[in-house]
Image: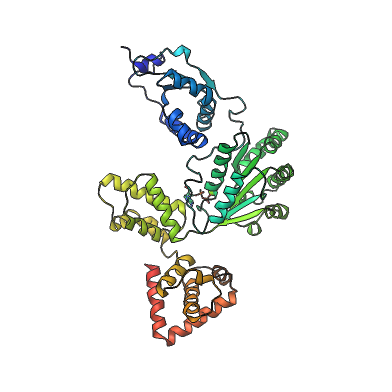
Amino acid sequence: MENTSTDLKPGPALGESTSVDPAVSTAWARARAGLRNEFGDEAFRSWINPLTLEAVHGGTAILSIRSRFLRDWVSANFAQRIISHFNAEHSGVVTIDLVVNTGADGETLTEAPRFTVPKEEADTSVGAPLDPRYTFDSFVVGKTNELACAAAQRVADSESIQFNPLFIHGGVGLGKTHLMHAIAWRIRRRTPLRQVAYLSAEKFMHEFIRALRFKKTEAFKEQFRSVDVLMVDDVQFMADKGATQEEFFHTFNALIDERRQIVVSADKSPSDLAGIEERLISRFNWGLVADVHPTTYELRLSILQSKAAEIGSRIPDKVLEFIAHKIQSNVRELEGALNRMAAHASLIGRAVTIEMATEVLKDALRANERHITIDEIQRRVCEHFNIKMLDMSSARRARVVARPRQVAMYLAKMLTSRSLPEIGRKFGNRDHTTVMHAVRKIEELRAIDSSINEDVEILIRALRS
Ligand code: ADP
Ligand code: MG
């Protein structure tokens, strides 16, 4: 019996020792993930998963599948998308051959149907590839991001325009890009005919400058104005780039006129963006402005639990709680910490402990030290005085809630770098003078009331630990 693998394609590189270039294998893995997103789990399991990447010659990837029936079905229904995904992940792969490999005696290769990436898709497509991990399914929703997530879902699920643009803003690593990709994936899945373009503001700028240089601005305009949904990430990068902003402004207006959907993200709210022209800012404010706030402890913990489950890592809850408690800066760092713990756990093959986490995450912990958030302060204060989080922002004036609220404002002033107005906002949009009053009051009380002083000291110690 012949070796099936050599039988697939006569060529010097094939044989038992054939191995695909790791970069191509990785691209194939990402393409598979992208296909799974596009077609759903069930179709993926039946039709895409059975494909094996056997070899790559020149620009042709050889994919095998175990029966002629499967091969024909995949050819008819998925092959064109397979090559598009593969090519998007690795521009060196432009063709796929679908061969049958029954495992006994591989069929002849000459019959293999061949699929080539369509010309217009090969490297001239608008936008950047999407990360297959960034879907709504993998996005953990909490108080701090529920508005942005609901708005993103609304945009993805409705074909009529609900608000235009959707402007998502918030600090780094809080899920803006994740939400934008999730919108794109869902629209592609639900309505494959609608053209969705996602790209960073930087890429928009580079493409525009290139178009200018090669006198292709008409083509540039055309490609953006023909999309149904345009998403531009991190528009703060357009700051002080006059010509790019001008072009974006016109693109923006043209699309809005045509009732196409626009989604924009930035690290600040429209009004706080520096270096962006007034007229663009006022356009950004037309639709829905949704922000993602810094995470709460609860959200961090559920993100950790969900990611730990995803990577199949068994890290005890106690340790996850410890990480959620200590790493507060953003979700990207949280993920990094979890991955390091998971890698460590799998290497030593022993149950992970908090002591171990302290050691493994030393640097990340140090970087997050003293970074106390107002949410954290409020949570602690509520626990300590046994009141509800709601009471931090409620208008209730009863002493049992008013005093703890003042303590929390005082601690926010003491332990964070937030300004009085910012603190006021976090406490049910109170005025900065209310915060100032609270700070003075608690200072006064600490000097004369030892039980209050003790409460405050316990809280400070807990928050700093
Ligand atoms: P941003 O664009 O706001 O800087 P990203 O969208 O790149 O942030 O998010 C950083 C990382 O954190 C990504 O890996 C993302 O998947 C993850 N992440 C952020 N928020 C969430 C969330 N709510 N649930 C799950 N993962 C999240
Ligand atoms: Mg981003």
Measured as percent of width and height from the top left, residue 433 is found at: 59, 77
Measured as percent of width and height from the top left, residue 35 is found at: 49, 33
Quarter that holds the C terminus: bottom left
Residue 201 at least partly seen: no
Measured as percent of width and height from the top left, residue 442 is found at: 48, 81
| Residue at 37% over, 72% down | 461
Q: Nearer the viewer, residue 307 or 354?
A: 307
Q: Is residue 65 positioned above or below 241 on the image? A: above
| Residue at 28% over, 58% down | 355
Residue 264 relative to residue 82: left or right: right
| Residue at 39% over, 85% down | 450
Residue 210 at least partly seen: yes
Residue 456: image quadrant is bottom left
Quarter that holds the N terminus: top left
Residue 12 relative to residue 116: left or right: left
Q: How many marks?
A: 0
Colouring scheme, one of rainbow, by chain, secondary structure, one colour: rainbow
| Residue at 57% over, 37% down | 188
Q: Residue furthest bottom?
A: 448
Q: Nearer the viewer, residue 451 or 398?
A: 398
Q: Nearer the viewer, residue 282 or 400?
A: 400
Residue 327: image quadrant is bottom left
Measured as percent of width and height from the top left, residue 393 is found at: 54, 70
